[in-house]
Amino acid sequence: MRLYPTGPAGTRAAALAAALLLLAGAGPAVADDGRPDRDFTIEDPRVTESSGLAASRAHPGVYWTHNDSDDGPYVFAVDSRTGKTLATITMRGVGEPRDVEGISVGPDGDIYVGDIGDNLDGAWSHVWIYRFPEPKELRDATVTAVQYDVKYADGARNAEALMVHPKTGRVYIASKNEDGGGLYEGPAKLTAGAVNTFRRVDEVPWVTDGAFSPDGKRLVLRSYFSAREYAFEDGRLGEDRSVAAPFQRQAESVTYTADGSALMFGSEGARSDVVRVEVAGGKDGSAYVGESGASASA
């Protein structure tokens, strides 16, 4: 079990993203005003492949993240004020995670971790979702997690985006494919000890992560170069538009702040930056994100 994983080789798109970042210059500086939910750098040397982000519901300004493949059953609580890890959670009872790619917090306050990656693009007959209650106190701890077996109705595939709807608690996965992926809807309630079949309900572009707005009315999906925000109603995607995603070395994660006032974009790599992008129209998470020169159309 490696605590400092290097992960698999990046895709051609990831390599191009890295080149663009180098041309663009250094990343954003860490905020020094002491407020939460600002730009920050993940300082923990163990977190070298931050592949998902989720805003804590119980601890303002704290973001849950995890490494990509080959790291083990670990989840980290990172303080956006300092970039430092406040707690390392070790999941017990989930076997050996294979390729953890997404994380989300449900309306019940439980944390859902998506072991849903498949770099061989359909080699695994099933993938897993792990679930445990968000700790009330932030300290290193071992928790017992529930493990759910997941299959797709139309066959195995690679995926990196796991989203739990903040009102219904239903789990969604967005698959990743150069030619476009799918949005998959899980059953109304996940069941341990049985196969949970996810069914394709819509088409999506290349996706490396996604997140629902706090009110559940919008869904943001990002890729290496861009992001799009969709209206979301009755489990289906509606009107969409480009949002102001920053260029990052390996653009892997996105989440809304807990109050819905902004999006937080993260990337892989040692001391990786998390960049805040304001949401136009207030704190309800229902407005579009404003365009900027840093955005790119999907």
Image (cartoon, rainbow, N blue to C red):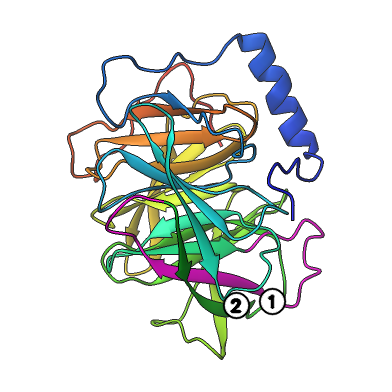
Quadrant in the picture for residue 247: top right
Q: Which residue is mark 1?
A: 126
Side of 179 where 57 appears, left or right: left
**Above/below status of 254 relative to 102:** above
Question: Which amino acid type corresponds to the residue marked 2 in the rendered image?
Answer: Val
Question: Which amino acid type corresponds to the residue marked 1 in the rendered image?
Answer: His
Mark number, residue 150:
2
Mark 1 vs 2, N-terminal side: 1
Side of 70 where 108 appears, left or right: left
Q: What residue span does the magenta drawing correspond to?
A: 116-139
Mark 2 lies on a secondary structure that is strand
Depth check: 6 or 44 in front? 44
In x, y percent, where is residue 60? 24, 42
Q: Residue at x 53, y 27 (%)?
A: 296
Side of 63 where 193 appears, left or right: right
Quadrant in the picture for residue 171: bottom left
Q: Are marks 1 and 2 in contact (CB under 8 Å)?
A: yes
Mark 1 lies on a secondary structure that is loop
Q: Residue at x 45, y 67 (%)?
A: 143
Side of 197 where 38 appears, left or right: left
**Above/below status of 292 relative to 95:** above
Q: Is residue 52 magenta?
A: no
Depth check: 127 or 15 in front? 127
Q: Is residue 133 magenta?
A: yes
Looking at the magenta stretch, what is its main secondary structure?
A: loop
